[in-house]
Each structure stands twice: as structure tokens, then as C-alpha cells.
Image: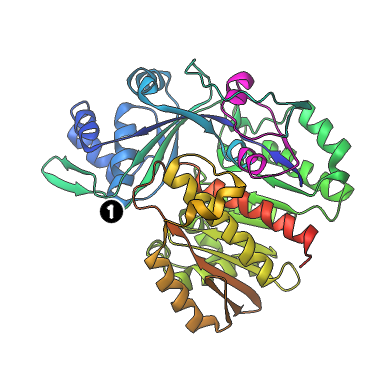
Amino acid sequence: MKVLCGYNVNIDAVYTITGEDISDLLKMVDKDELLEKIYDGPGEIRSITDLVAGLVLHMQKGTGAEWFIYSDDVFHFLKSRYYEKSEIRLGGNMGIMANVMSHMGADQVVMNAVGDINLIKALMSGGNIIFSGESVPQDTSTSKDANEIIHFVFDFSSGTQFDLFGTEVIVPRENRFIATYDDINTELTITPEFEEYSLEHVKDMDGAIISGFNQLQRCYPDGSGYSERFEKAHSQLKDWKALNPDLPIHVELGHFMSMDMGVSIFKELAGTVDSIGMNEDELVMLTELHGVPSDMIRKMDACTILDACVRCASSTGLKKIVLHTRDFMMSIFSKGASSSIREMQSMQFGVNCAAVFAASGRLPERSQLEDSVSGLARSEGGVKQVNKMQDLIGGERLECGVCGDFRGFSVCILPTIICEKPVSTVGLGDTVSSATFLRWLEIGVNGGQ
């Protein structure tokens, strides 16, 4: 398979934050100011108090989020305090997805090359990558040199405890909070080399997987908004479709800094691309489109999530939504866009890859994938949701899941494979999505729909 990948890649400094770490940070901030910001989350980081508020807010809920850093002082504080203690990994939705696909057997993966190229190359494990038109040397060494596009990823675990000014907080589930310092991906930078290479070779490509729109900012220092930057990328996708109408384009949505931006960009992309992937937090962001209460979605009720996804697809004309959560994965697609067997087999491949990555922190060798997941168990919560879904959509059992119909759409759902103590939750959504897309392309070529 030959795949185009845009647009965002960065360096992740991954740190597992403990209750003791939070206690130390709480000593550095004003109590009243912090409680006010926890109650009304600023959604961005301009001070240490904003940082601590974001961590506490999302650890309390067990939810994931990404807030941008708009303070050099906060960046230098994070870098001096956590960078050397962090695991330095390849980051950015596109960077992770490109690496997964190349590692899991894609013949050629073409990346939009931005940032510290040498450091990014050194963090990639896959082969057959074309980086701005040149093959990437396979160097597995890592570096902790400073980088201008560092995303500080704070992993937190279920059961982590800390005292919040006399109130005991117990984290309900594992997740991560990301503090992002990045002036390159926020511009949705597209290199001239990627533009030229993709236009020249798009007719030979089997698919394209795109991400990074969530890095866009509502307002930039020059006073401009995100629209012009989005339109440049959107026009590129339209050009690809014009040159190769059969090119499947999948977009990973990501967590936007504002709901209205997320809704606007989703609606624009829905008329161009073939599928959009997201998690439950990102689905909540689209409430304006589906009208489903966010608390019901966050309870991981599969029937409620299906209802929200179908409403989003129906109102925008989108052909397919792929929804991935901790406990289950779901595909909702219009008739003729795919087949139940193709969806279920590709999702199972993606779930397997993500499970091994969660358990080991490394991507599996493809030949060893089945053996690698043999010691891991299906999510009990996911199995319950699959059974509940079968009561709603009827249909048939396929693989470990269920396929059926709902309001004119085909639906497939299967439980994930759970690692109770994951090495990291970072990149699991990108791993499952890109592995699923790769397998979906392969099945289309080898077995049709």
C-alpha cells in the first residue's frame, strides 16, 4: 500500500504524573485562583496556575485533553522540570500514524516533513518512509536535544490519589493531559516538497490519512483566524480527489481548542473526505450537530454514541465515522461505502496493534501480532456494550463483535483488548486508526468489499 500522510508531527515528552507530583505543583499556586480556574477551565496555558488547573480538572474526570502553551516562562518551567525525566517519543497524529503504517507493512508512506527532521527520523521505527521526497534512513537512536515543537504529555493512571486542599481526589481512569508548545503545527504547515510530491504521485497512491486540523488556533498573533490555513489544506485534499477520484481519504479529527472550530471544520471536511475518526471526547465536541447530552456519551454508552454518530453523518453527508474508545471500537457507514466483513477485519487488526502497543510501548512485528495479544483480555465493559448494541441493531455476530443496521447506516462494533496497566496511553487512538486504515486498504485490494 502507498499512503499520503499529512500534516502534523512533533516531539512528545511523555511523563507519568503521580499524586506526589500534583501535590508539589499545588504548593506553587494560589488556592482561590486555582479553584476558580478548575471550575471554569481556561482551555489554554498562560501561567503555572493554568497548567495545574488543566491537570487537576482532567485527572478528576479521567478525561483527555490538549491545551496550548502561550507563555515562554511556562514552557521553560516544564522543560527544566520534566523534559530530562520524560520518555522522548515521536508525536503528532500524522507522525504516529505514518510510523504505524510503515512499521506494519505499508509499501510506501509519504510524510509532510516539518520540525526537527533529524530528531524525528531518529524516533521512527518503520521503513519505506518518504520524507519530503527523500527516503528516511532507518536510525533507531534517540536524542533529548531541545526542540521547538515539544508536546508535554502527562500520562495519569486510574487510582492515582492526591489531596486538593482537603478534598481527596482519586483518578477514575487512565488518560493523558497534553501541554503543547508549537508554532509550526499550529500554522498547519505544508512543505513545498510535500505539495509537489503528492500532486505528482497521487494517481499512484492507494489512500491518504490526514490529521492536524485540531492544532489550528482561533486567532494568531497577526490578528488572522484559522480559516485561511484550513482552506489551504482543504484545497489540497480537493486537488487529490480531482486527480484521483478513487483515492480514499481518512481524517483523524483530534481535540479542538473550541467547539465551534471543531464543528465548522468537521462540516467542511465531511463533503470532501471519505471517513473521519474520533474518540468520545471529540464526539462530545460535536454536540451542536448531534444534540446528544455529553454526560451520556462520556458514560461510554454505545447506543447513545451510535445515535450521536449517525446524527453527525446524516446532517453532513459524511459517508463513514470510525469511533474508538477505551472499551470498544465502532464503524458507522453508508450503504456501499464498505462491507461489514471488511470493517470488522480491519478494526480487529487495529485493536490488536493498539493493545500490543499499550502493553509494551512498542509496535509489534506483524508476523507476531496474534501471539502478542494472546495473553490479553477483551474489555468486559466493551463486551457488555456490544451485547447491548445487538439488542438495538439486531444483525449478526462477526469476529468478536456485532454488525447490523441503524437508521439507514450499516454499523459494526467490537470490544477492544485491554491492558490493565498500559505502558502509555499516548498515541493509542492514532495507532488503532492508522492500523485499521492500512488493513482496510489491503482488504480492498486483495479481497474487494
Residue 29 vertical placement versus 258 (above, below): above
The answer to whether one can see residue 386 in this image is: yes
Q: Is residue 312 magenta?
A: no
Closer to the camera in the image, 125 or 148: 125
Q: Is residue 136 left or right of residue 407?
A: right
> Residue 229: horizontal and vertical position, in percent?
68, 36
Residue 131: quarter of image: top right
Highlighted magenta segment, given as a residue range: 98-127
- Which residue was labeled with disc 1? 172
Give the residue displayed 66% in from the left and 72% down from the top: 340
> Residue 173: horizontal and vertical position, in percent?
32, 52
Closer to the camera in the image, 97 or 371: 371
Residue 269 vertical placement versus 54 (above, below): below
Tell me the kind of residue under disc 1: Pro
Give the residue displayed 41% in from the left and 41% down from the top: 424
> Residue 402: horizontal and vertical position, in percent?
55, 75
> Residue 132: horizontal and vertical position, in percent?
75, 27
Query: Can you say which quadrant of the picture contains the C terminus?
Result: bottom right
Residue 54: quarter of image: top left
